[in-house]
Amino acid sequence: MIDWRDIDTVLLDMDGTLLDLHFDNHFWQAHVPLRYAEAKGLPLDAAREALMARYSARAGTLDWYSVDYWETELELDIMRLKEEVAHLIQVHPAVVDFLAQLRRRGKRVVMATNAHHKSLTLKMAKTGLEPHFDAFVSAHALGFPKEQRGFWEKLREIEPFDPARTLLVDDSLPVLDAARAYGIRHLIAVRSPDTKQPPKDTRDYPAIDSFAELLT
């Protein structure tokens, strides 16, 4: 799938790509509604319905990914709630072997994530993946989500990668679309971001079920 001679820089998403998206889906769709219902004295179904409408309104924006935004909006301690279910944070199979291979090959490895820095810190602490990376870039530091061209322009200012010699692995089709439009040549999608859900349609993007497929 990849000729590593053509790659200098590897950009990797976090949630749903390196890490099982089940944690995030459970957190936002089940745990936050439960705690919100308790805090507001609402029936669980009513709380969930209200939250889903709020989520939908902010989808694709930096607010959707912002711990600070949701702490203010919902009047909940989001990071404390994440700690309550942090045992669900799991690394996808073969990820560590893949990262080790990138290091052996001398590639520059950058995590490019929409995740808020507080979430990034929690997940690196729980997974131990941090030493495998040369750099971490959160969309919140750049002012644009990865779905927007501005992210890639700002990223290139601090990480001077050659789009023609860069690989991005991501589970989000809108993000892959934005990267493709910017000119990133090597793009791979993830079929099963959430291992508790059926595989997703990745359209015309080359896709993997496991990072084992990229090991050579």
Image: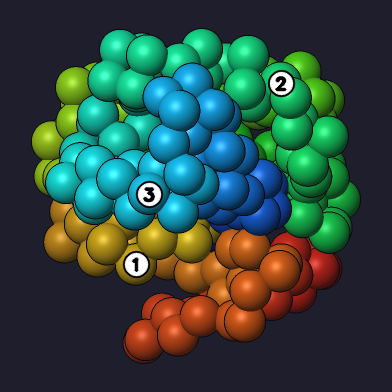
Q: Does 48 sit left or right of 103 as displayed?
A: left
The residue carrying mark 3 is 46
Q: State left or right for residue 100 relative to residue 207.
A: right
Q: Specify the amino acid type for callout 3.
A: Ala
* Residue on which disc 1 sits: 173
Decide which of 32, 168 is in the foreground and name it: 32
Upstream in sequence: badge 2 or badge 3? 3
Mark in front: 1 vs 2: 2
Front position among marks 2 and 3: 3
Residue depicted at 83% across the width and 59% down the height? 93
On the image, the x and y values in percent for residue 159 come to 36, 26
- In the visual, does 24 lie left or right of 142? right
- The residue at the point 51 percent across, 80 percent down is 200
Query: Where is mark 2, residue-wise?
Result: 83
Amino acid bearing label 1: Leu
Give the answer, above or below, for where 83 lies relative to 178.
above
Q: Is residue 157 visible?
A: no
Q: CA distance from mark 1 to mark 2?
A: 29 Å
